[in-house]
Amino acid sequence: MATNYIGVNELTDKPMPVKTPTSAPFWDALAEHRIRIQYSPSLGEYVFYPRVLAPGTLADDLEWREISGLGTLFTYTIAERPVAPQFAADVPQLLAIVQWDEGPRISTEIVNADPAALVLGMRLRPVFFDYPAHDVTMLRYEPA
């Protein structure tokens, strides 16, 4: 299934993530509108957030694999007040935890959705937001 893409041309004063050597493969894949997360053969599981050693086993066997990005709404909140002054124009914000089909969960924002229509367990698909001025692509979700 193809994922959506939204180009964001305006400059933003919002805080942006900082790519580190450990997280670079994740951010580089988002820039290509793909999602890559780590997989641990010793665990037999995908893991997220990016890290150096596998959780639980501390094995040095993490490898980057592409995932679909499809998932379900695990939980959410509707932020009626901005989480920081830079987000004042974005309220209400639909802040959510999405559980990927591959297992891990990601903290994100739901877009293109009516807050009243959100239901735990609903299917979601990724939407990529490019911020060229900051050389970053953000991952958000919308109802599938």
Image (cartoon, helix red, strand yellow):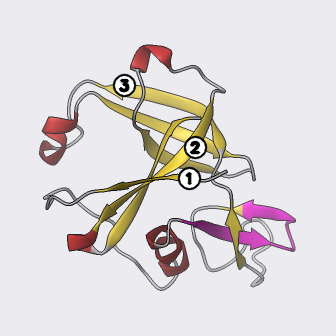
Magenta range is 34-46
Contact, CB < 8 Å: mark 1 with mark 2? Answer: yes
Query: How far apart are labels 3 and 1 at the CA level?
Result: 24 Å
Residue pointed to by mark 2: 125
The single residue placed furthest to the top in the displayed view is 116
The answer to if 44 sits in the magenta stretch is yes
Quadrant assignment for the C terminus: top right
- Relative to 28, say whether 35 is above or below: above
- Image spot of residue 3 (x, y percent): 56, 52
Packing grade of label 3 (10 A; few <14, some 14-19, many >=20) is some
Label 1: element kind: loop
Amino acid type, mark 1: Thr
The single residue placed furthest to the front in the displayed view is 2
Mark before the other along the chain sequence, 1 or 2: 1
Q: Of tags 3 and 1, which is closer to the observer?
A: 1
Q: Residue at x 14, y 48 (%)?
A: 86
Residue pointed to by mark 3: 78
Q: Classify residue 90 by image quadrant.
A: top left
Q: Nearer the viewer, residue 5 or 61?
A: 5
Amino acid type, mark 3: Ile
Overall secondary structure of the magenta section: strand
- Image spot of residue 63 (x, y percent): 73, 79
Query: How far apart are labels 2 and 3 at the CA level?
Result: 19 Å
Residue 3, disc = 1
